Amino acid sequence: MREIGVSKIKETVTELCLRANFELRKDILKALKSALKKETSTRAKNILKEIMENAKLAKKKRLAICQDTGLVSIFLEIGNDVAIKGDLEEALHKGVEEAYKKGYLRKSVVDDPLARRNTNTNTPCVIHVDIVKGDRVRISVSPKGFGSENKSAIKMLKPTASVSEIIDFVLEVVRNAGASACPPLVLGVGMGGTFDHAAQLSKKALLRSIETRNAKKHFRSLEKDLLKAVNSLKIGPMGLGGKTTVLGVNIEEFPTHIAGLPVAVSVSCHATRSAEKII
Amino acid sequence: MSEAISTNKMINISTPLTEDVRKRLKAGDEVLLSGTILTARDAAHKRLCDTLKKGKSLPLKLKDAVIYYCGPTPTRPGRPIGSCGPTTSSRMDSFTPALISLGLGGMIGKGDRSDEIKRAIKRHRCVYFLATGGIGALLSTKVKSSKIILYSDLGPEAVHKLEVKDFPLLVGIDSKGRDLYDKAGRKKE
C-alpha cells in the first residue's frame, strides 16, 4: 500500500484551482486561434481577439480569466493500492477554500438552494471518486461558471432513438443556450448509464482535451457530426453571428438499460477551465 | 448591412448618459464608455424592486445612470478591482422595467433581452450595451477605481460604484428599440 497524506492532496487542489482560474487550457487556446483564422465577420474576429488577449493578461497578472470563478467539481481517481491518511473530504474543501482566498477568486457558493446564504469560502465543492488500478491519485479540478451550467440539459431518449434525434436534441440545447452561455462553447456529452451517470459523464467529457476523440469509431464520427451541426447554427461568438459557435464536442459513454438512452449535454463556455495532476 | 445597424464606428461617450447622448447611438455601434457605472445583479435588483414595491424611494439616483450587471472577484491589493466581466442580462429582465421607468440611462450586460425590455427601452429612450462575456481580466484594466456603496452584505453582489475609462462596449439595443441580436439571427421560434 502506498500512503498519501491528505495535506499533499489539499496542496494539490489549491494549486490546481489557481491554475484553472488563471491559465486557459492549451487545447482551448489552440481552438480559439484556429477559429480566428476561419472567421470572416469582423465583429466575431474582434471578440475572439479579446478572448485571447484576456487569457494572456490573466496568466501574466494572475487575474481570474472570468469573474465567475465557479462552483468547483473535483474528480478523483484513487488507485486501489493507495491508502489515504487523514480526512480526505475536509482536505478537498479546504484546498478549494485556500485557493479562493489566496487567489482573490469570487465566493459564489450559497449554503442552501432556498435559504441562499453565501458560504464565503466558495465551498463546499462537488466531489466524484472513482477507484482505479494502481498506486497513484489523479486529481482533476473543474471550476464551473453558471452562465453555461444553467444551459446544460438531459433527455431520456427512447432506446430506438436515431442518431439524428440525438443530434436534434444537442442542437436544441445549443439554440437554447444562445448568447447567455458565452459562445463559442465547449460541449460535453454523456450517453448511456442512468439519468445521473449520463450527467456525470457529460461533465467528465469536458475534462478531456477537445483535440482528443472518443476511442470508439461510431462515437468519433458522432462527435464530428455534432460539431458540424452545431456550428451550422451560426450563433457565433457571444451570439452575434459567425462560424464558431462550438469549439469542440466530447462524448463519454457507458453501458445502459435495454429500455433507455439517456443523453446529457454539459454546456461550457469559451473559458472552459480545468486542471489536473497525478500524485 | 441595413442603415439601422452601423459598422465599425468607435464612439467615445461618458456618463451621465443623457438622452441627448443616447439618441445618437445605433445598435451595433462600438463605444468606449468613460465615467461612473454601478454594478448590480440578481440579489441587488430584487432588493431595489422590493424597496419600490413598498413605496419607498431608492437609495440610488438612477436618472441617466448606467447599471452594469456584474459581480466582480475580490480586489487584489494594489489593483482597483478584480476580474469584472458581465453576467447574463436576461435574469434581470423582470426587475428592469421599474428601474427604466425611473430614468435609467443605460444597462450593460451580455445576451439578449425580452420583448418587454425592448419596449421599455424604446419608451424611455435608454440603451442596452453589450460587454464581451468571459474577459473579466481585460475589462478590469478599464476600471480606475471601485467602491461598494450599497448592500455590502451581498459580497460580490453588492452595488459597486466604478469609475471607468474607455470601457469597450457594443450597443445591443438602441433607444429606438433596434436590437443587434435580431440582426444576428436571434432565435425566433
Image (tube, helix red, strand yellow):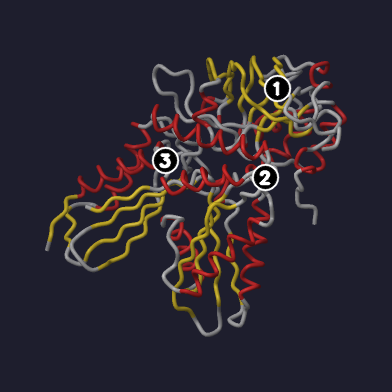
| Numbered tag placed on residue B10 in the rendering | 1
Q: Position of residue B184 (x, y in %)?
A: 75, 44
Look at the image and tell me in which quarter the C terminus of chain B lies. bottom right
Question: Disc 3 versus disc 2: distance between alpha carbons?
Answer: 30 Å
Q: Which residue is mark 3?
A: A122
Residue indicated by mark 2: A239
Q: Are marks 1 and 2 on the same chain?
A: no
Would residue A79 be found to the left or right of residue B135 on screen? left
Q: Quadrant of the N terminus of chain B?
A: top right
Q: Identify which amino acid the numbered label 1 is placed on.
A: Met
Q: Nearer the viewer, residue A112 or B126?
A: B126
Instruction: Tell me which chain the residue with mark 3 is part of.
Output: A
Q: Badge 1 local density, few (<14 within 10 Å), some, or many (20+)? A: few
Where A35 falls versus A189 (above or below)?
A: above
SS for callout 3:
loop
**Subunit ID for the residue under disc 1:** B
Q: Regarding mark 1 in the picture, which secondary structure is present there?
A: strand
Rate crowding at label 3 as few (under 14), some (14 to 19) or many (20 or more) other CA atoms within 10 Å.
many
| Left or right: B58 as drawn, with respect to A270 | right
> What is the CA distance from the residue labelled 1 to the residue labelled 3?
39 Å
The amino acid type, in three-letter code, at marker 3 is Asn
Task: Give SS at disc 2.
Answer: helix
What residue sits 58% from the left and 47% below the top? A184
Return the x and y of residue A113 as percentages of the image width and height: 53, 49
Residue A43 position, x and y percent, is 67, 36
Q: Amino acid at mark 2?
A: Gly
Q: Mark 1 to mark 2: distance in Å?
A: 21 Å
